Amino acid sequence: MRIYKLLQGLLIEVDSDFYHIAETDWDSFINDDQLHEKAKKAIQQLKPITNAKDLLATQLDAPMSTQELWASGVTYFRSKQGRQEESKSAGGADFYARVYEAERPELFFKATRNRTVGNGGLVRIRKDSTWDVPEPELVLLMSSSGKIIGYTIGNDMSSRSIEGENPLYLPQAKSYDGCAALGPCILVAEQPLPKDTKIELKINRDEKQVFAGEIEINQIKRGFEELAGFLFRECSFPTGALLMTGTGIVPDSSFTLRSGDEIVIHVDAIGTLVNKVA
């Protein structure tokens, strides 16, 4: 089951049929420990619509409202390597090795809704940065109780030049206008995602592919329940929260994003998130 946030209401997709619920507040609908059952009941009296494609083309919004978007760092081995590479000259490489092995994960605040775009939106690279990459990630949707109730795709735009200067510059490297993309929907499943679920990234420039990578989520060092548990230890989220789980696809130091690049992130069960760089 997939739930799409629209500018007005939402769409629920079940077995390729779409159901439109026009007068529904996103926050109140999505924040439910039994979201799968709630959505099933919500469409029982509805008929499938025939204009879903038009609604998705003109009304699709990022699947986020008042929720905060947080992120996890150094959860994949490749991410550890990338962070060590970028911060080596600043003496920070050892910190990332320690985080990878530590009991406590690295969690940081990423964005509010106004700094986040949806599918088809424009992400940004900082004007004061010289080395920028997308980070394709599986994102957890959690209810206000801390229960994982859904999944979506995220792009954690990152300034490697700024973070590499000093690990303490992480907030500036990660959080700014247009720093994140989410979408295209929320996958609500009765069972956790299979361990071999694959995240795929492609970057196109001038209609040519300039980078591609993929990884399965079984390569993540941290468990999803573990990450969610740490986030909710001393923080409350009245309408739920979203948590990026980290990336295992990191372009090497010879690559940096440019204005006009197209970033395509695909997860089979969820769909495809496409954004261009402003």
Image (cartoon, grey):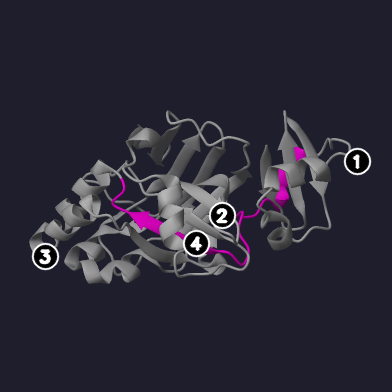
Mark 3 lies on a secondary structure that is helix
Name the residue: 83% across, 35% down.
50
Mark 2 lies on a secondary structure that is strand
**Which tag is nearer the camera, tag 1 or tag 2?**
2
56 within the magenta span: yes
Instruction: Confirm or deny contact between disc 1 and disc 4 (CB under 8 A).
Output: no
Q: Left or right? Give the position of 143 relative to 73.
A: right
Q: Position of residue 52 (x, y in %)?
A: 77, 40
**Label whose residue precedes the other's in the sequence (1 or 2):** 1
Circle 3: residue type: Ala
Q: Position of residue 77 (x, y in %)?
A: 24, 42
**Which tag is nearer the camera, tag 1 or tag 3?**
1
Circle 4: residue type: Leu
| Quarter of the rendering containing residue 90 | bottom left
Q: Which residue is mark 2?
A: 142
Circle 2: residue type: Met
Q: Residues within 10 Å of mark 4 (few under 14, many from 20)?
A: many
**Label whose residue precedes the other's in the sequence (1 or 3):** 1
Q: Which residue is mark 1?
A: 45
Name the residue: 48% across, 69% down.
235
For residue 90, the mark is 3
